[in-house]
């Protein structure tokens, strides 16, 4: 509420808060903590975050959760570390390759989507995102955003 006691309406250029799913690989305990901090920071900004460790309980269907979370979320943040990209590119079993198949299918269906936002983290190699995602995914770090341990996330697109 403004000082005058009147609620201020959001300005037309201000972001719409969304539901975001975070896709990431279990690289290390430090990386999982970083992802948890990112999710907490986004939640603090009013963005509803779907994170596997927050949502899944022992015995629940993990693949059903991943498919629903990707399909129903407004945005999908893909935390692209070298390990994440390697796992997405090799296509072998596991969560990252499974999520990659769902993401690729949505990209084929709607090439103009802004739903998928790669967050490039801790990479030294030239390949920053999985090969099959091509230029359909754009990394957006300009404008307003948040920083999570040195990585800027452009919140205006969430």
Image (cartoon, helix red, strand yellow):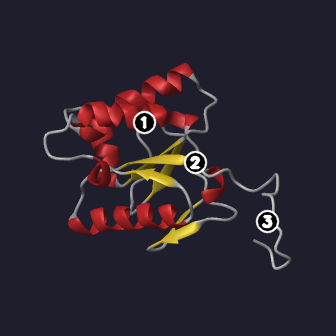
Location of mark 3 (residue): 7
Packing grade of label 2 (10 A; few <14, some 14-19, many >=20) is some
Quadrant position of residue 37: bottom left
Q: Is residue 3 left or right of residue 77?
A: right
Question: Could you tell me how many numbered marks the image carries?
Answer: 3
**Looking at the image, can residue 57 be seen?**
yes
Say which quarter of the image contains residue 85. Answer: top left
Q: Residue at x 38, y 32 (%)?
A: 68
> Residue 48 placed where, x, y %?
49, 52
Q: Earlier in the sequence, mark 3 or mark 2?
A: 3
Would you say the residues marked 1 and 3 are in contact, meaning their CB atoms lie under 8 Å apart?
no
Residue beneath the point at 35% across and 31% down: 67
Looking at the image, the residue that sits furthest to the front is 5
Residue to which mark 2 is pinned: 18
The relative height of residue 39 versus residue 126 in the rendered view (above or below) is: below
Q: Secondary structure at mark 2?
A: loop
* Residue 99: x %, y % from top left: 34, 35
Q: Residue furthest left?
A: 59
Q: Position of residue 42 (x, y in %)?
A: 50, 62
- Pointer 1 or 3: first along the chain: 3
Give 48 or 102, whichever is nearer the viewer. Answer: 48
Residue named by callout 1:
70
* First in sequence: mark 2 vs mark 1: 2
Q: How far apart in space, not on screen, are marks 3 and 2 (Cα)?
A: 21 Å
Q: Nearer the viewer, residue 69 or 2?
A: 2
Depth-wise, is mark 3 or mark 2 nearer the camera? Answer: 3
């Amino acid at each position: 509420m403004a000082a005058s006691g009147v609620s201020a309406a959001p300005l037309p250029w201000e972001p719409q808060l969304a539901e975001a799913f975070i896709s990431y690989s279990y690289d290390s305990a430090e990386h999982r903590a970083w992802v948890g901090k990112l999710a907490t920071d986004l939640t603090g900004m009013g963005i509803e975050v779907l994170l596997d460790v927050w949502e899944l309980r022992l015995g629940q269907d993990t693949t059903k959760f991943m498919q629903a979370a990707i399909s129903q979320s407004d945005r999908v943040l893909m935390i692209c570390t070298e390990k994440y990209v390697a796992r997405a590119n090799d296509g072998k079993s596991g969560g990252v390759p499974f999520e990659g198949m769902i993401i690729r299918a949505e990209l084929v269906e709607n090439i103009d989507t802004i739903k998928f936002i790669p967050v490039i983290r801790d990479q030294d190699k030239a390949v920053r995102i999985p090969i099959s995602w091509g230029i359909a995914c754009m990394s957006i770090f300009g404008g307003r955003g948040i920083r999570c341990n040195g990585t800027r996330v452009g919140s205006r697109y969430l």
